[in-house]
Amino acid sequence: MARRKPLPNRAERRRAERRRKRTLIAIVALIALPVVAGLIYMSLPKSQDVNTGPKFTKQGELQLLDGETGEQIRQIDIEIKQNDQERAEGMMWRRSMEEDQGMLFIMDRNEPQSFWMRNTYIPLDIMFIGEDKRIVNIRKNAQPQSLSPQPSKGNAKYVLEVVGGFADKHGVEAGDRIAFTRD
């Protein structure tokens, strides 16, 4: 006949229960540690390399013309945005733009327009341009990462975004005109 092992007393049962709890805690910690480390790594700021984000794609050229004489003030390369999805993204996520580059938005209707600077990392001069291709008004150095509206002061069919300070540097003002060609 096999000998029966004596039942553990209360103290031994408590010790065994504590060992099981410690083992369970160790297993959970070993599983949770890599998960927590991964979450921390993903939340760390990424490199602030100025070349990150969407790249400029030249789709045409735009001339800024003096409103009175018609003489060219400046010519820039442009990227054109003309559907809802393209216009909604606009300059979002871009960390740089050259002074000889701009983004031209072609709107569906000639009406009051308003832009914001959500997820836009660089200050911009925003030029609102009527159907006659005359600049209605310029919102200079629009603040990056802002949800404040940047409205036109009248109807606009086109909106041109260039680096902040461009208008002052080149003497571009309301009343001047644009002409553009597509590649």
Image (spheres, rainbow, N blue to C red):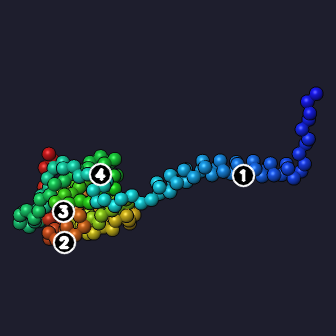
- The residue that disc 4 covers is 54
**Chain-order first, disc 4 or disc 1:** 1
In space, the residues marked 1 and 2 are separated at their CA atoms by 69 Å
Whether residues under marks 3 and 1 lie with C-beta atoms below 8 angstroms apart, the answer is no
Earlier sequence position, callout 3 versus callout 4: 4
Q: First in sequence: mark 3 or mark 2?
A: 3
Cα distance between the residues tagged 3 and 1: 63 Å
Earlier in the chain: of badge 1 and badge 2, it is 1
Residue highlighted by disc 3: 99
Q: Earlier in the sequence, mark 4 or mark 2?
A: 4
Compared across the picture, whether 140 is left or right of 149 comes to left
Toward the viewer: 152 or 164? 164
Instruction: Please name which of the two marks, 3 or 2, marks the residue nearer to the observer.
Output: 3
- In the displayed structure, 13 sits above or below 147; it is above
Secondary element type, mark 1: helix
Which of the two marks, 4 or 2, is nearer to us in this view?
4
Comparing labels 3 and 1, the label whose residue is closer to the camera: 1
Q: Residue at x 33, y 68 (%)?
A: 143
Residue kind at label 3, given as amino acid type: Glu
> Which image quarter holds the C terminus?
top left
Q: Bin the neighbour count of mark 2 within 10 Å (Cα to Cα): few under 14, some 14-19, many 20 and up.
A: few
Q: Label 4 neighbourhood size at 10 Å, few (<14), some (14-19), many (20+)?
A: few
> Which residue does the numbered mark 1 point to in the structure image?
22
Kind of residue at disc 4: Pro
| Residue underneath mark 2 | 168
- Residue 2 location (% of width, % of height): 91, 30
Mark 3 or mark 1: name the one nearer the start of the chain.
1
Q: Is residue 68 above or below residue 40?
A: below
Q: How many marks?
A: 4
| Residue 110 drawn at (x, y percent) | 26, 54
User: Could you tell me how far apart the alpha carbons at marks 4 and 1 are, in whole angstroms?
Assistant: 51 Å
Residue drawn at 63 percent across, 52 percent down? 29
